[in-house]
């Protein structure tokens, strides 16, 4: 029921000769009390609950497996959907800090939820555990927003609430853009979840037609670009989608988005030791974004079993950040969260799927090493897009 488009609930109630106020009662149960079953829909007569049970699912998530780490500051959840697909969300707590005077904190307490838009991912970034899982399917709108309801339900007993939602979990959001936009509308609707759009971030690894479509819509949520490299040869390896839409084309689309919407674009950059953390890469990044309404988040890579790489050292990250700042670009260094809970995107689902055979891992590592060595020499990839990604891109047209 959480994924119903505006007006559909009212229409269904009218067809069943129910008064209009029932819609408010149902939304109140779904979005204020986070109902999981028909029985938890408050103030409804039994006959209406029975009819609802025949037509709708109150919750699309069948089971949740929660792992807590960082002294309780990070909660990673593996959600099992009705067809057995596994998706992940991560709830990150940021305590209030600093002092602004009059007893007010300089930085308020925040609770940020990272959610998935697809089961698996077709993009296939080699430093990402989700990419190794491959693509399962797009999530439906209710399956996306029910991840938010799950986290909100966990926070409610302590009087806390979500302050931010980011679409940076499993999947490429702009390859499921219709459902993502429906989810954002529901999450920002004051009758439903009521989170302001400016507290929502939607990320993409560079689906240029999707960025252009967002620009035309003029959303108030923040656009984030998973960049990870400023040079095409290297980004071809780190983000295979770059073979379809090169980095300059991605940044041009993001630049237009910032100009039209007035919203600063956030660029995510995973730091990989000896691969994309050199001075050459820092200078290329500064040149690429100079003068743009943009900000860079540097994120040390989480360890992933099939990948031969390691995270950049804190010292190297600091040096890289300073060099980019010197080039005139704002930079924030993000701390890794929940490493002992399988923090890398897709890692819990990958663990549940079981370790791949050692020979397959060895071949994958050798392939990544060869590709990255060629990229470091400035050679563009000649490989086609992965089959799953080619199919997903071909189907990127909006669904009606």
Image (cartoon, grey):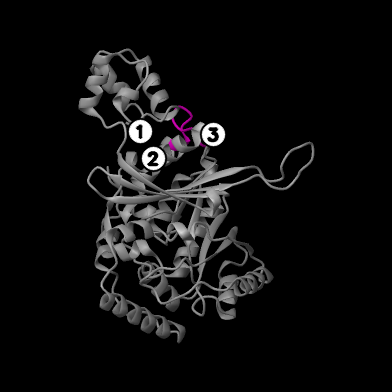
Residue tagged 2: 145
Q: Does 394 sit left or right of 22 as displayed?
A: left
Q: How crowded is mark 1: few (under 14 residues within 10 Å), some or many (20 or more)?
A: many
Q: Residues within 10 Å of mark 2 (few under 14, many from 20)?
A: many
Q: Does the magenta stretch include residue 192?
A: yes
Label 2 and label 1: CA atoms lie apart by 7 Å
Residue at left offset 52%, top offset 57%: 337
Q: Position of residue 289 (x, y in %)?
A: 57, 66
Q: Nearer the viewer, residue 329 or 314?
A: 314
Relative height, residue 271 to residue 45 (above, below):
below
Q: Does the magenta stretch include residue 182?
A: no
Q: Residue furthest front?
A: 71
Q: Where is residue 306 in the image (x, y as percent from the top left)?
A: 35, 72
Q: In this rendering, which labeled residue sits more in front, label 1 or label 3?
A: 3
Q: Which mark is residue 158?
A: 3
Q: Which of 358 and 1 is in front in this view?
A: 358
- The disc, 2 or 1, on the residue closer to the chain's N-terminal end is 1
Q: Does 384 sit left or right of 301 as displayed?
A: left
Residue at left offset 72%, top offset 48%: 98
Magenta-drawn segment: 187-195
Q: Where is residue 339 in the image (x, y as percent from the top left)?
A: 48, 60
């Amino acid at each position: 029921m959480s994924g119903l488009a505006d007006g559909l609930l009212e229409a269904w109630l009218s067809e069943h000769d129910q008064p209009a106020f029932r819609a408010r009662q149902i939304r109140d149960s779904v979005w204020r009390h986070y109902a999981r079953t028909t029985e938890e829909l408050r103030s409804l007569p039994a006959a209406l609950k029975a009819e609802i049970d025949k037509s709708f699912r109150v919750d699309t998530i069948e089971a949740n497996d929660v792992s807590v780490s960082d002294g309780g500051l990070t909660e990673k959840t593996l959600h099992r959907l009705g067809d057995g697909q596994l998706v992940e969300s991560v709830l990150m707590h940021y305590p209030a800090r600093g002092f602004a005077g009059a007893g007010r904190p300089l930085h308020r307490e925040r609770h940020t939820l990272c959610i998935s838009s697809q089961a698996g991912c077709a993009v296939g970034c080699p430093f990402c555990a989700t990419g190794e899982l491959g693509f399962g399917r797009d999530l439906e709108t209710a399956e996306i927003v029910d991840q938010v309801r799950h986290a909100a339900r966990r926070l409610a007993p302590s009087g806390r609430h979500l302050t931010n939602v980011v679409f940076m979990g499993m999947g490429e959001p702009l390859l499921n853009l219709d459902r993502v936009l429906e989810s954002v509308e529901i999450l920002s609707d004051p009758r439903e979840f009521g989170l302001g759009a400016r507290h929502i971030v939607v990320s993409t690894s560079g689906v240029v037609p999707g960025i252009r479509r967002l620009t035309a819509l003029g959303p108030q949520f923040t656009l984030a670009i998973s960049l990870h490299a400023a040079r095409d040869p290297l980004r071809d390896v780190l983000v295979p989608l770059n073979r379809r839409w090169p980095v300059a084309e991605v940044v041009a689309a993001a630049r237009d988005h910032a100009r039209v919407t007035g919203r600063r674009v956030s660029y995510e950059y995973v730091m990989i030791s000896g691969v994309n953390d050199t001075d050459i890469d820092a200078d290329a990044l500064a040149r690429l974004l100079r003068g743009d309404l943009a900000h860079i988040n540097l994120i040390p890579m989480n360890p992933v079993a099939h990948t031969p790489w390691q995270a950049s050292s804190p010292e190297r990250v600091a040096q890289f950040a300073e060099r980019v700042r010197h080039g005139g670009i704002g930079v924030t260094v993000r701390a890794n969260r929940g490493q002992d809970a399988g923090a890398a995107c897709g890692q819990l689902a990958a663990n549940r799927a079981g370790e791949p055979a050692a020979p397959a891992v060895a071949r994958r590592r050798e392939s990544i090493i060869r590709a990255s060595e060629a990229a470091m020499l400035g050679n563009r990839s000649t490989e086609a897009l992965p089959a799953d990604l080619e199919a997903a891109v071909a189907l990127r047209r909006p669904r009606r």
